[in-house]
Image: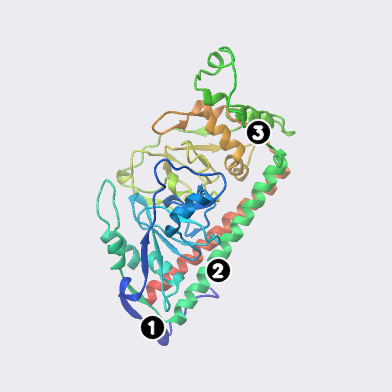
Amino acid sequence: MKHDLILHEKMRKQKFGKFGSLGISVSGGKRIPKGEGFSKEGYPYIRAQDNKGDYIFGETSPKISESLYERLKRYTVKYNDIVLTNVGNSIGDVGIMKNCTEKCILTENCIKITAKKGVLQEFIFAFLKTKYGQSQIKRETVGTAQPKLALERIRDFNISVLSMELQKSVKELVDLSVEKYIEAGLMYSKAEQLFISELGLEAFNPSSEKVSIRTLRESFLSTGRLDGEYYKPVYEDCIKKIERYSGGCELLSDCCEVEDGNYMPDVDRRYNYIELSDIGAGGEISGCTEAFGGELPTRARRRTKEGDVIVSSVEGSLKNCAVITSQYHGALCSTGFYIVRSDRLNPETLLTLFKSDIMAELMKKGCSGTILANISKEEFCRLPIPLIEEKAQEEIADYVRKSISYRERAKIILEKVTESVEIAV
């Protein structure tokens, strides 16, 4: 690689010490106060689930109002700050802020790490992703039901601070990785815009009315649903819009195959296991758990193959969808996903469809339940699916494939950085 790190003797000069003694600042985030909600417009509230893909832009983060931001601004996280998840099963996830707004608030389940002069943020970011950083995170985590990594333990982390020459080489590679990640986002945005244009959604403004009057025959007797939310006018507007698509429309059950059967893993065989939290904002799989079948949770019961599209069935994460690439062929996924495949729509078009706002609305309509609402297979199969014209499908697929390729390139570069830092340390 052109940007490989060459470890000359002069570059091996390094300082060794604890975060606190080296001026590396560690501070916590803040929970949204009880009774406060999120806004459609406002400033990003960075959560642990937003810290899954190395670089944090806040694209999928909920928004808080300016007045709430002013009350919580001591918990602001800024461009190039490092974010470390310190609570729950995602402890050890490390990201670096690349959102350029100065008004982002950090959740209580994450830690902000910033350095003083002499240590580059990109170097600390890379160090925490190495085996030396991750081993300290695992060692200092306490608790079982709700594991936690305390602030004071992070301040006592040991770090080898390499020469500034080597740190700048690390920064150069991280910047290159970020560049590829941004290019991936641009490619996916083009796929989204093409989809929106194809369906004529540019000026689509569904009803905001909250009341819909239906007879018993028009409601329960035909749908089996008595919950008033199911009949909101916004859903009817979305269905009509899809049904009017010039290329035609069919129910999902008529144009796609939905796999929801259980697969029993072999206890002595190793599998890649994909959870809802492993899905990135661009429809990519940001990581997975590798374990023997006997060690996997009971929800690891769906087996995927290359070209499948996995779609979340859980309300609150309905846009968590991804295409299964060759890297994850044969992987298991959570029962929180439906596996969708079609010979009428290519995987990339299906991905763009299920991540669209209009489809997310209709999936939300089909959700039921109280503790963990989800969309049943029956409701899922009743979703109206536009049969996108073949030419548009090919263009969408091209953009999505480029997006996936750029993201994979970004990941490879970052892995090279991590490996190089490990060698140097």
Q: Amino acid at mark 1?
A: Arg
- Residue 331 visible in image: no
Q: CA distance from mark 1 to mark 2?
A: 23 Å
Q: Is residue 211 above or below residue 406?
A: above
The residue depicted at 54 percent of the width and 52 percent of the height is: 59
Of the image marks 1 and 2, the number of the one nearer the N terminus:
1
Which label sits in the foreground, 2 or 3? 3
Checking the image for residue 206, the label placed there is: 3
Residue drawn 54% across and 25% down? 230
Label 1: state its secondary structure.
helix
Label 3 vs label 1, nearer the camera: 3
Q: Is residue 416 above or below residue 233?
A: below
How far from the left and from the top, in percent, is residue 14? 36, 81
Residue on which the image places disc 1? 12
State the image coordinates of residue 403 (x, y, percent, origin top left): 60, 55
Crowding around mark 1 (Cα neighbors within 10 Å: few <14, some 14 to 19, many 20+) is some
Q: Say which amino acid is labelled 2.
A: Leu
Q: Say if residue 333 shows up in the picture.
A: yes
Q: Which residue is mark 2?
A: 176
For marks 3 and 1, the one nearer the N-term is 1
Q: Residue furthest left?
A: 143
The quarter holding residue 264 reads: top left
Judge by depth and name the residue closer to the eye, 30 or 181: 30
Q: Is residue 24 above or below residue 74?
A: below
